[in-house]
Image (cartoon, rainbow, N blue to C red):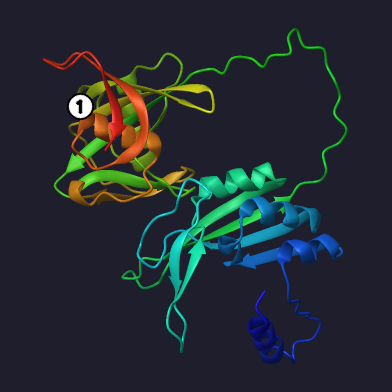
Amino acid sequence: MSPTQHERAASTHADVQGVQFAQGDVAEYLAQAEPFDAAYAIGTLAFIDPHRALPALRDGLRPDATLILSLLHTDLHGRGPSTEVAPREQMILLRDDPPLPTQMCILAPQLWEDLLTEYGFRVEAIDLLHHPDESVAVIQQLIRARRLPARPARVSSRPRSTRPPVAHAVVGVGAILVSEQGILLGRHRRGTLELPGGTVEAGESFDAAAVRELGEETGLIALPGDVRLLGTLVDHVDSVLRVTVGALVRAWRGQPATQPDESVGEWAWHPLDQLPDGLFVCSAQILTAWRPDLPIDHTPAHFAPFAHGDAPAATTADGL
């Protein structure tokens, strides 16, 4: 959109053959251009409403075309991504001029994946790229997606009812491990920070599921007798009833480490008074059910503690 930036790019790269620089609104440009074989948006989608940019990119790319997005995951202040499409004020640091205030969308990887899926793309990979200098808090997302072909004509069937089936319940378990360094959390490939845990398998007890998931995800070894079940948390996600059981693991052997083929890794201990942003909702709910004084915001869930002494019959974990 900037004439100055267009002139700077065209003059700097004037000796590059086969390159054309266009100045204008990207959605309007793609609407009148021939479809492209690939697109690479370097930081730019943070400044555009994705509900406008992504349909334009879908229509401006050929079927099976590759779309690469480079986006911020954390900002210059180390603040993590948002889970809703809402811009926030950021300062662009310029080389010779004062910082420039602007509005940017810094979105969680899962939200980007949901948006891309909604507008006709299949996400193939999401990588979080840390700065080589560990003192720099900024993390980049690199998202690789592919433009799906147009859907073929749909074949009708004869359902018994026009109403969709009732969603099934999802039952999982999350494990709290506390050491002198704090709480054990890992990073999911989609960017959220999570407690060890996962789905309870058929015929499996909650404490056995906590021990199994702990071993599969972190390599730590515990016994069911080392597990104290805290209670159940119930909430709804997209009309699916989600039941999560919190578990406190009191003893274990080994050191946590990223395990092959697991979606959560980079395990680290986080002090209770310095918990990071970007917690997975279920993990946040478990932590505040265990310690209601923790300053964690999350969507509410109904918590029913298991009988351990004088525990109350039920409460609601709403966050603070």
Q: In the rendered image, which residue does mark 1 sit on?
A: 226
What x and y, as percent, mark residue 246? 29, 27
Q: Is residue 213 above or below residue 272?
A: above
What x and y, as percent, mark residue 304? 28, 17
Furthest residue toward top: 160
Q: Is residue 293 above or below residue 165?
A: below
Q: Residue at x 42, y 60 (%)?
A: 74
Q: Residue at x 19, y 46 (%)?
A: 272
Answer left or right for 91 relative to 304: right
Amino acid type indicated by mark 1: Asp
Image quadrant containing the N terminus: bottom right
What x and y, as percent, mark residue 88? 45, 58
Q: Residue at x 50, y 63 (%)?
A: 103
Answer left or right for 9 relative to 315: right
What x and y, as percent, mark residue 203? 42, 13
Q: Looking at the image, which is closer to me, 192 or 300?
A: 300
Answer left or right for 176 relative to 132: left
Image quadrant containing the C terminus: top left
Q: Looking at the image, which is closer to me, 34 or 232?
A: 34
Q: Is residue 154 above or below residue 35?
A: above
Q: Residue at x 38, y 48 (%)?
A: 278
Using the rendered view, name the quadrant where residue 226 is placed.
Answer: top left
Residue 254 seen in this snapshot: yes
